[in-house]
Amino acid sequence: MGRHSCCYKQKLRKGLWSPEEDEKLVRHITKYGHGCWSAVPKQAGLQRCGKSCRLRWINYLRPDLKRGTFSPQEENLIIELHAVLGNRWSQIATHLPGRTDNEIKNLWNSCIKKKLRQRGIDPSTHRPLSEVNAEAGDSKNDNSNKKIETQAVMDESHVSAGNEFKHPNAIPRAETANPKFFHVPVEDNNLIASDSQAMLHNGFINSNSTTTTATSTASAANISLPKEFFLERFN
DNA sequence: AAGATTATCAACCGCCTTTTC
DNA sequence: CGAAAAGGCGGTTGATAATCT
């Protein structure tokens, strides 16, 4: 249907929100809740469309927002989640309390992508750039785009409706003794203290394997996560 | 100091899905 | 059951700030 119908009806304000508009929206929602978003602007006395109000509330005015810079732990979690979920920002955001999908998306596009490339990792596939480039070169040489197409298809179906896990990073490594676990690379030994502990506590980290914990001193480590961890949390 | 370039992030756009009538 | 409305999402844009030359 394209553009929201409410935008046609009258000349509505666009662009940055003024403090007065914010105040009106906050006051209205704290008092009455948002209910039907398309009705909010009228009820709150705003010259905005409902979608705009919803976005402003979710991304900026909600009281439970954390704001501020992302911690290295949060960044690592985003990288791990992106490896599994791809660009499903809203799903990623559900695992970072107080963060919005928009915020995470912005961080990814402006910062994390760059960092991953600097580390030699392709941000879209989470594989070493050398491998990705080599494949691109191969496909150029044989004048065929089959590999790229295959990769694109895999990227499109990170999490399928079925039970199979299709993201390339989620495919268990051939050498993995226990195919029940997926390996997730952790950069710079910044493993997420709270998350890894929670995962350990919940049985998601295989503590008998070569898995690291937050206290590990290894310079690089892998944590092994069971398929159930992803399926339960990301479906 | 000033102009150019780059980085950041709030907000919009358009599409798809779900809900309502 | 189909159409319209509403909700939700990801991609993209544009304004502003920060940094570089």
Image: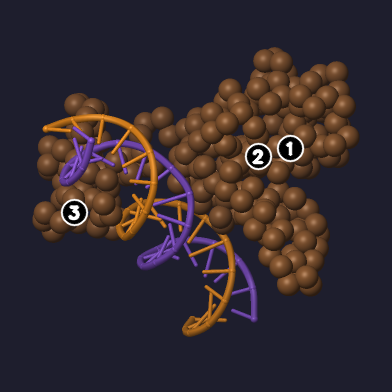
Chain colours: A brown, B orange, C purple
* Residues marked 2 and 1 touching at CB (< 8 Å): yes
Instruction: Give the numbered dot on residue A7.
Output: 3
Give how far apart the Cα atoms at labels 2 and 3 are: 40 Å
Residue visible at 64% across and 32% down?
A164
Residue A215 visible within the image: no
Q: Earlier in the sequence, mark 2 or mark 1?
A: 2
Q: Give residue A38's position: percent from left, percent from top.
A: 19, 40
What is the crowding at mark 2: few (fewer than 14 residues within 10 Å), some, or many (at least 20)?
some
* A110 versus A29 height, above or below: below
User: Which chain does the numbered disc 1 sit on?
Assistant: A
Frontmost residue, C3 versus A130: C3
Q: Give residue A110's position: percent from left, percent from top.
A: 56, 56
Q: Give residue A30's position: percent from left, percent from top.
A: 24, 28
Name the element at disc 1: loop
Give how far apart the Cα atoms at labels 2 and 1 are: 7 Å
Give how far apart the Cα atoms at labels 1 and 3 are: 45 Å
Q: Amino acid at mark 1?
A: Ile
What is the crowding at mark 1: few (fewer than 14 residues within 10 Å), some, or many (at least 20)?
some
Residue visible at 86% across and 23% down?
A209
Q: Earlier in the sequence, mark 1 or mark 3?
A: 3
Report the residue marked by disc 1.
Answer: A171
Marks 2 & 1 on one chain: yes
Q: Give residue A156's position: percent from left, percent from top.
A: 57, 48
Residue visible at 71% across and 55% down?
A122
Q: Amino acid at mark 3?
A: Cys
Residue A209 horizontal side relative to residue C2, left or right: right
* Residues marked 1 and 3 touching at CB (< 8 Å): no
Name the element at disc 3: helix
Report the residue marked by disc 2.
Answer: A166
Instruction: Give the numbered dot on residue A85.
Output: none
Q: Earlier in the sequence, mark 2 or mark 3?
A: 3
User: Which chain does the numbered disc 3 sit on?
Assistant: A
